[in-house]
């Protein structure tokens, strides 16, 4: 009896309450459903990338321009970018901390609820905390390229019951380098002109952001967010030019000293409401964005070693303000049908000022002010459901666009457009069995010119070549049909597309002023076929994602000489290894074979990236990265347009060794009972 009692007492002494249970599940960085690729950023090595734009560049099919101002998807052109419910531009993404990103999804066949401007969508979902208290993350990245670059950011999350507050601030000291050149032959005027430009920039960036998310009830929430960026550039461009004009040979050295200041602001407010009694959802959002830019340039030329002389002073100002609001409503019926409708209003106002003083003539020979206004209104309806085992979705958007552009002092509008367009979309998914599905899609979309195309700013490369904007660009209309066969998490998609008025670079020679004008124009048409194969793979410590695109693309215009289009291959393969002692290794290779696309002849590429990461002391995450190991990120582009043969050369500063340190601290603790009350899926648009 005494023995039993002692045992009972001993058991009581050892009895303790478990404060939390942590279940560790190995997550895959890449997954795919219905031909869409989803990337888990928060739980993978990708969370250590220094900026959100650099993060995009590491994903399959995503391509950035050399100045990282434009993004495109292989086989899809320029995609829409969404952060949660709101459509944003690439410049908005530059102010978003990687620490705030949960997932990125590449949607190849977006439904009618997305704006019609784009054949694909890059959907970014932000994180919302499951912990109560405060957590602070300090992120420091030292990057070694041609010159040293440094990224420093601090992110704070404070959560109290149903309210979450986020704030971040970052300061970057960057020293980017780039080089470009062109070899021109103009046989009609017996001209051979070659230049090679090299740019070194000292760039300071101050990034900031703040946001609050509040759960009003289990079915209702509201969020407010603001982020922005101040940027100062001191850019020195050195250009060496050889110009042979009817045997008059000149060697010119051009120095272009630029001071550029940019400020960017993006803010939005969202409201979500679920009506459980009628199985419906309502979303409302407003957004305001502002971009202001000022550039002062001093240009000097040295002709045939006679000494540098001040040639021009250019002052260029550009600003754009965009206000938009949208509402979306969706209702599900008992027969598995879903009706989705919504409205959109957008208003943009851009102003551009361009002043040039030409010291050779000692006159203020250019003083241009240009105002641009655009209004876009749209609405959509989409019906989806299920007939037996077949899922379907049909919908359409109607969008009206009104544009006016006028130069100061002019009594007439230089641009006056008012057009309404209809964009149907349809999708059918037919399950073959539990592992295989086949789907069919049709979509019509539009790509409107960027607001920056209204800027009167131009880049002076040398006395014979300038790069300028084109305010007369028309939108590009695309139609495409596709079919996708999905086997578990692997898929094969076949797509045929046609595009009217696609936008590409062109050259035009003005003999009266002996100047080559380099700018974007609308080409007549583009068509092509794309076969995409996506193969994720996982085995023990190894997981990978491989994408192959077999493409035939033809770009045509009466002004451009067209060569035979030939198939080429885009390939992307990422491999992640969970190594002993907590080390993680990432190996990524991607590239193109040689591309002949009608008007354009482009070179092959092969890029290799490596990254190794490990977490020390539970809270210190370290990542060592090696990008573009073989220094192959160089582009060649050959085109003959308007009887000008141009061979473009573009060199980028992507070979990099970087070390990232990320440290978290605070008093955040897992919530015990309100996990069901936290609505992490603020992105209603899926």
Image: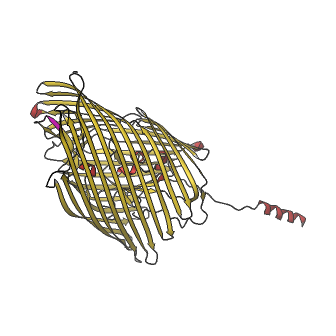
Out of 623 and 577, give the one closest to the viewer.
623
Q: Which residues are magenta?
A: 511-516
Pick the residue in front: 470 or 211: 211
Q: Position of residue 593 (x, y in %)?
A: 31, 40
Marker count (numbered): 0
Residue 348 left/right relative to 563: right
Relative to 335, residue 18 above or below: above
The residue located at (43%, 36%) in the rendering is 656
Q: Is residue 223 magenta?
A: no
Q: Position of residue 628 (x, y in %)?
A: 40, 37
Q: What main secondary structure does the magenta stretch of the protein show?
A: loop
- Seen at 31% across and 55% down, the residue is 321
Q: Which quarter of the picture shows residue 588?
A: top left
Q: Image point 47% across, 67% down: which residue?
A: 221
| Above or below for 382 versus 84 | below
Q: Do we see residue 46 in this rendering?
A: no
- Can residue 439 be seen from the camera position used here? yes
Question: Which quadrant of the figure contains the C terminus?
Answer: bottom left
Q: Relative to 432, is 143 above or below?
A: above
Residue 19 relative to residue 341: left or right: right
Towards the viewer: 52 or 161:
161
Percent across and percent down for residue 569 are 31, 44
- Residue lying farthest top? 305
Which quarter of the figure is the N terminus placed in?
bottom right
Residue 57's spot in the image, x, y percent?
Answer: 39, 45
Q: Quadrant of residue 580?
A: top right
């Amino acid at each position: 009896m005494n023995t039993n009692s002692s045992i009972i007492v001993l058991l009581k002494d050892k009895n303790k309450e478990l404060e939390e249970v942590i279940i560790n599940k190995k997550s895959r960085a890449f997954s795919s459903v219905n031909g869409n690729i989803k990337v888990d950023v928060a739980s993978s090595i990708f969370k250590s990338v220094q900026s959100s734009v650099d993060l995009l560049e590491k994903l399959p099919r995503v391509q950035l321009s050399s100045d990282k101002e434009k993004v495109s998807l292989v086989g899809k052109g320029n995609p829409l970018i969404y952060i949660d419910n709101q459509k944003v531009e690439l410049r908005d993404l530059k102010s978003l901390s990687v620490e705030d990103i949960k997932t990125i999804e590449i949607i190849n066949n977006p439904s009618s609820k997305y704006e019609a401007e784009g054949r694909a969508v890059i959907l970014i979902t932000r994180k919302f905390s499951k912990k109560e208290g405060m957590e602070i993350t300090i992120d420091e990245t030292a990057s070694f390229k041609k010159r040293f670059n440094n990224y420093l950011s601090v992110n704070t999350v404070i959560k109290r019951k149903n309210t979450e507050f986020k704030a971040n601030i970052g300061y970057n000291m960057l020293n980017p380098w780039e080089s470009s050149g062109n070899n021109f032959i103009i046989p009609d005027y017996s001209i051979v002109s070659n230049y090679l430009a090299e740019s070194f920039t000292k760039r300071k960036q101050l990034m900031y952001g703040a946001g609050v998310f509040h759960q009003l009830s289990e079915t209702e929430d509201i969020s407010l967010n603001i982020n922005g960026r101040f940027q100062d550039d001191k850019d020195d461009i050195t250009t060496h030019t050889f110009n042979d004009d009817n045997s008059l040979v000149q060697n010119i050295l051009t120095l272009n000293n630029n001071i550029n200041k940019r400020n960017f602001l993006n803010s939005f407010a969202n409201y979500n409401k679920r009506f459980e009694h009628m199985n419906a959802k309502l979303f409302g959002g407003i957004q305001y964005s502002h971009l202001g830019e000022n550039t002062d340039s001093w240009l000097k030329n040295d002709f045939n070693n006679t000494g540098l002389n001040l040639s021009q002073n250019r002052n260029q100002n550009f600003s754009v303000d965009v206000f938009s609001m949208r509402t979306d409503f969706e209702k599900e019926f008992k027969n598995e049908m879903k009706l989705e409708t919504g409205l959109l209003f957008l208003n943009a106002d851009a102003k551009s000022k361009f002043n040039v003083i030409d010291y050779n003539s000692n006159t203020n020979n250019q003083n241009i002010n240009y105002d641009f206004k655009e209004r876009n209104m749209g609405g959509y309806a989409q019906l989806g459901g299920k007939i037996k085992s077949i899922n379907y979705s049909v919908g359409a958007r109607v969008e009206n666009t009104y544009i006016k552009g006028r130069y100061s002092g002019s009594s007439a509008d230089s641009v006056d457009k008012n057009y309404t367009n209809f964009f149907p979309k349809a999708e059918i998914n037919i399950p073959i069995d539990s592992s295989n599905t086949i789907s069919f899609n049709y979509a019509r979309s539009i790509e409107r010119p960027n607001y920056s195309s209204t800027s009167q700013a131009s880049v002076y490369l040398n006395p014979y070549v300038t790069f300028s904007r084109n305010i007369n660009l028309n939108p590009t209309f695309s139609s495409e049909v596709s079919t996708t066969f999905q086997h578990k998490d692997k898929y094969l998609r076949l797509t045929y597309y046609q595009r009217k008025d696609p936008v590409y670079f062109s050259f035009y020679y003005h003999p009266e002023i002996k100047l080559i004008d380099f700018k974007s124009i609308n080409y007549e048409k583009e068509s092509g076929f794309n076969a995409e194969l996506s193969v994720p793979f996982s085995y023990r410590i190894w997981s990978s994602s491989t994408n192959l695109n077999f493409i035939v693309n033809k770009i045509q215009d009466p002004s451009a000489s067209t060569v035979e289009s030939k198939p080429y291959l885009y390939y992307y393969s990422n491999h992640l290894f969970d190594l002993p002692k907590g080390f993680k290794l990432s190996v990524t290779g991607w590239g193109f074979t040689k591309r002949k696309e009608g008007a354009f002849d482009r070179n092959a590429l092969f890029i290799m990236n490596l990254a190794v990461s490990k977490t020390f002391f539970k809270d210190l995450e370290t990542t060592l990265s090696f990008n573009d190991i073989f220094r192959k990120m160089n582009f060649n582009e050959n085109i003959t347009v308007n009887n000008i043969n141009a061979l473009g050369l573009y060199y980028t500063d992507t070979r990099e060794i970087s070390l990232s340190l990320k440290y978290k601290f605070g008093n955040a603790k897992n919530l015990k009972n309100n996990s069901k009350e936290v609505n992490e899926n603020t992105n209603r648009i899926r």
